[in-house]
Image: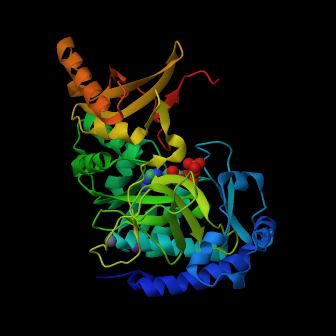
């Protein structure tokens, strides 16, 4: 087995030793910021008081609201002149937050990202087409520097403009793409509609991430485009991509424990959940100097996969994200995650690439409607066929989410498309 970084070969003891030293250094560094200076002192934490990794639990959580309240500089640990980059989260849920990086932070990030790409077989002779947004969104520049660090010829294509993307792939023999899963499905369908076979496109690997998606969606991307797709997880507060990444086993994402400490807690109590159970992911940076973040509540729901990965890396694996704690819909008292709906829809071959969950309130009762795009060949004139399909989808959804949704079948490409992360839920209920 070929590794990019010595840390990939570490055993559990080596990981824990490095984590303890780095956690102490991180606490020392963090205390230079006005925010952590105050909160850590108040909690009675000093670098010396971190004697074992269990002491991590004495450190208070950091939340998205903390970051908002400290906007724009309250977590900075070095003078502004030492910062060379800032990113802001895409603000999918509320106002943005800022993360700063020094040059050494950026170098470390690029190394982590290169390690991820290398793990799935990307090498310096690959051509890497980066089809996500540059700018404040971390996915674009994050993968860009990682691919360059690895030595790939890197094409900063950006998102959208499917015709040009396909031309770039053909002209430059693109072998690896970075693409948001909802756009990958769209692109494959668009090529097919243009009368061409998306299978015949050059890429052999796709890095997909940035938004929740199901195993069914991944398999569909792989089948339509004839490549291997690997799940990539990250968030701005922890740099962006490069935090956790699937290996070639495609069974969970290794979270790089030499650079982060990952915990999974019960979001209600803040206590760790029993190993293997789903909870909220909490992350601590171990290598960041400009703006370390301690025990950040990601609001992403996942679990640690038990057991060791056959690939030989000991770094623990995170299961596919179930969704965000704040994605959860409560309809008629039942908790529903959009990913449950996607899982059902993608199992129907007639279903196209896009869907939209619409929440409405009628006479004080919440209703859930699912608008589903059908593939062109499935959108037949025969009403009986369509009604049968509609009923079958509604029934399968009811089995999964326990409430009966209204299902509306719509034509291919008729639902709004986002350039970046897909918007899956439209809430039309009047706010009380
Ligand atoms: P925002 O919170 O504004 O969207 P980011 O751009 O930092 O900010 O997005 C990070 C979030 O994107 C994560 O917290 C997670 O919810 C989601 N995300 C990123 N990668 C994945 C992935 N592979 N699977 C599921 N969700 C992901
Ligand atoms: K090269
Ligand atoms: Zn592995």
The residue depicted at 60 percent of the width and 53 percent of the height is 135
Give the percent coordinates (x, y) of residue 204.
28, 60
Residue 311 sits above or below residue 405 on the image: below
76 or 352: nearer the viewer: 76
Residue 316 is situated, as x and y percent measured from the top left of the image, at 41, 71
| Residue at screen point 31% across, 36% down | 400
Residue 85 as seen in the image, left or right of residue 298: right
Q: Is residue 360 left or right of residue 168?
A: right
Please tell me in which quarter of the rendered image ligand 3 is found. Answer: bottom left
Residue 117 at x, y percent in the picture = 40, 69
| Residue drawn 62% across the image and 45% down it | 91
Q: Is residue 417 above or below residue 39?
A: above
Q: Position of residue 238 (x, y in %)?
A: 58, 64
Q: Quadrant of residue 26?
A: bottom right
- In the rendered image, is residue 293 in sight? yes
Residue 319 to residue 334: above or below: below
Q: Is residue 106 left or right of residue 305?
A: right
Viewer-closest of 104 and 63: 63
Q: Is residue 148 visible?
A: no
Tally of numbered tags: 0
Q: Residue at x 36, y 64 (%)?
A: 305
- Check the picture and name the quadrant holding the C terminus: top right
Q: Nearer the viewer, residue 397 or 32?
A: 397
Location of the N terminus by quadrant is bottom left
């Amino acid at each position: 087995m070929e590794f990019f970084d010595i840390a990939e070969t570490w055993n559990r003891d080596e990981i824990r030793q490095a984590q303890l030293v780095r956690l102490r250094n991180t606490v020392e560094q963090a205390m230079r910021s006005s925010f952590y200076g105050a909160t850590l002192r108040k909690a009675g934490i000093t670098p010396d008081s971190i004697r074992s990794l269990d002491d991590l639990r004495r450190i208070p959580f950091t939340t998205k609201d903390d970051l908002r309240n400290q906007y724009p500089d309250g977590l900075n640990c070095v003078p502004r002149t030492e910062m060379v980059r800032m990113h802001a989260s895409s603000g999918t849920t509320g106002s943005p937050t800022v993360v700063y990086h020094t040059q050494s932070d950026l170098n470390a990030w690029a190394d982590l990202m290169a390690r991820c790409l290398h793990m799935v077989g990307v090498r310096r002779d690959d051509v890497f087409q980066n089809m996500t947004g540059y700018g404040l969104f971390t996915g674009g520049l994050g993968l860009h520097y990682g691919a360059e660090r690895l030595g790939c010829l890197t094409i900063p294509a950006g998102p959208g403009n499917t015709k040009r993307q396909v031309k770039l792939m053909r002209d430059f023999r693109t072998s690896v793409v970075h693409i948001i899963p909802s756009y990958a499905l769209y692109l494959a369908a668009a090529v097919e509609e243009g009368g061409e076979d998306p299978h015949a496109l050059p890429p052999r690997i796709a890095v997909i991430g940035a938004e929740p998606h199901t195993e069914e969606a991944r398999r569909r991307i792989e089948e339509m485009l004839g490549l291997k797709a690997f799940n990539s997880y990250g968030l701005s507060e922890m740099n962006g991509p490069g935090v956790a990444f699937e290996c070639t086993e495609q069974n969970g994402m290794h979270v790089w424990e030499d650079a982060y400490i990952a915990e999974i807690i019960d979001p209600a109590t803040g206590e760790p959940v029993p190993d293997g159970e789903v909870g909220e992911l909490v992350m601590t940076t171990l290598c960041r100097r400009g703006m370390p973040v301690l025990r950040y509540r990601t609001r992403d729901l996942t679990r640690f996969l038990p057991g060791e990965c056959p690939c030989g890396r000991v770094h623990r694996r995170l299961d596919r994200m179930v969704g965000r704690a704040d994605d959860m819909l409560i309809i008629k008292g039942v908790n529903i995650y959009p990913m449950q709906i996607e899982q059902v829809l993608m199992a129907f071959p007639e279903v196209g690439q896009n869907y939209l969950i619409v929440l409405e309130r009628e006479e004080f009762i919440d209703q859930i409607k699912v608008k589903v795009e059908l593939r062109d060949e499935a959108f037949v004139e025969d009403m009986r066929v369509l009604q049968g399909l509609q009923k079958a989808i509604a029934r399968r959804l009811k089995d999964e989410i326990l409430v009966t949704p209204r299902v509306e079948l719509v034509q291919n490409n008729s639902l709004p498309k986002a350039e970046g992360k897909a918007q899956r839920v439209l809430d039309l209920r009047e706010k009380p």
